[in-house]
Image (spheres, grey):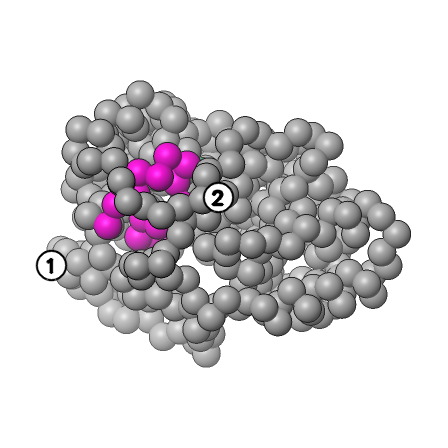
Amino acid sequence: MRDLRVSITDRCNFRCLYCLPETEEAANFYQTRFHPPSANASVPIQYGWKSRSEILTYEEILRVVRVAAGLGIEKVRITGGEPLLRRRVDTLVAGLSAIPGVRDLAMTTNGFRFAGVAQSLRGAGLHRVSFSLDSLDPGNFRRMTGRAGLQEVLDGIRLAQDLGFSPVKVNAVVIRGLNDQELESLAGFARERQLSFRFIEFMPLDSSRAWQRDLVVPGREILERLRQRFELVPVEARGNPSETAKRWAFADGRGEIGIIAPVTEPFCGHCNRLRLTADGKLRTCLFSLGEHDLRPMLRGTASDDDLASALVEIVRHKEAGHRIGQPDFVQPARTMSCIGG
Ligand code: SAM
Ligand code: SF4
């Protein structure tokens, strides 16, 4: 295990159709196009935001990361919910960047509030930032995210590049009938702006359980379409078998695209990730049905050694892989916004 994703809040200022589809438009999209899943064996979704007292403090997060780094974690990604809804994230970044062993510190954000804090995050030691951007059309952007915020996100991406965050990654979740018609324009944007653009298959982690296989645009199909428009050359994984994206550079050398296909081409065998939820639960897989509550240890009398032993024990039970598409697949109770993508 080398990669720890830390969700610092379960709250969000967006309502993405694939994550927190709580807008009327989201309901209309799902209901008019597809029948709601009937026989989707699943455990009930957990609704409601966590209270402040349930959420880990920055000190508690730093302690978990310090202990995890002592055990081999090297990459830390701050995520959410929307991480920039929390106050003074720069102080957390400064604390994380000072932990010995953390050699890569990144953040995933919807970008809406990024411009206001970009400089302070950079100054505090954030290395990399990934934005979510599913559409370049203002109307479709609002439809997908529930908010009219395209310009703010574009400004955030521009600023991240200007400030020297490198690489600046941008993620798009592709949903058939919603934004798949924009594949080529999103890739063109990546090329023009020299971005690292990731197309991600829609996974069953949404709060309304509206996910349907028909809505997933398989990674292979995405690649075929982009190959018809652009000359793409494969990029080697540079000895990192845990990389989730298969990557292609534009033949004229500017920017690259990556395809993350967890549904149609699972990469579980190489997974080196752990996830810490905002309320202090350690998850060994996005699709785990069980979680390991670290909060009692953090707020009790456990020593760092006790915490380290618990982490080692938890990791021993990491799942072999997810079971999307298997008859016994069960969608977890927590949604992507709670787990941290
Ligand atoms: N709010 C931030 C953002 O949107 O970038 C960080 C948290 S968000 C949960 C992290 C990533 O998860 C985003 O890139 C988002 O696109 C992705 N995501 C959320 N729900 C997803 C789903 N059902 N399938 C695939 N990716 C999803
Ligand atoms: Fe919020 Fe990110 Fe989920 Fe969109 S994907 S609703 S921005 S947490």
Residue 295 image point, x, y percent: 74, 47
Left or right, 268 with respect to 5, comes to left
Q: Is residue 56 above or below residue 238?
A: above
Q: Amino acid at mark 2?
A: Ala
Q: Amino acid at mark 1?
A: Gln
Residue 86 image point, x, y percent: 63, 33
Give the mark nearer the N terminus: 1 vs 2: 1
Pair 1/2: label in front: 2
- Location of residue 99 (image quadrant): bottom right
Residue depicted at 68% across the width and 37% down the height? 55
Question: Label 1 neighbourhood size at 10 Å, few (<14), some (14-19), many (20+)?
Answer: few
Residue depicted at 28% across the width and 71% down the height? 234
Report the residue that reaches farthest toward the bottom. Answer: 239
Q: Nearer the viewer, residue 81 or 21?
A: 21
- Location of residue 29 (image quadrant): top left
Considering the whole magenta stretch, tell me its main secondary structure. Answer: loop
Name the image quarter holding the N terminus: bottom right
Disc 1 and disc 2: Cα gap in Å? 40 Å
Residue identified by numbered label 1:
228
Residue 287 image point, x, y percent: 46, 55
Residue identified by numbered label 2:
333
Count of numbered tags:
2
State whether residue 182 appears in this view.
no
Q: Nearer the viewer, residue 129 or 73?
A: 73
- Magenta range: 198-213
Dots 1 and 2: beta carbons under 8 Å?
Answer: no
Residue depicted at 81% across the width and 63% down the height? 306
Report the residue that reaches farthest toward the top. Answer: 24
Is residue 111 one of those drawn in magenta?
no
The secondary element bearing badge 2 is classed as: loop
Left or right, 259 with respect to 46, comes to left
Residue depicted at 73% across the width and 32% down the height? 53
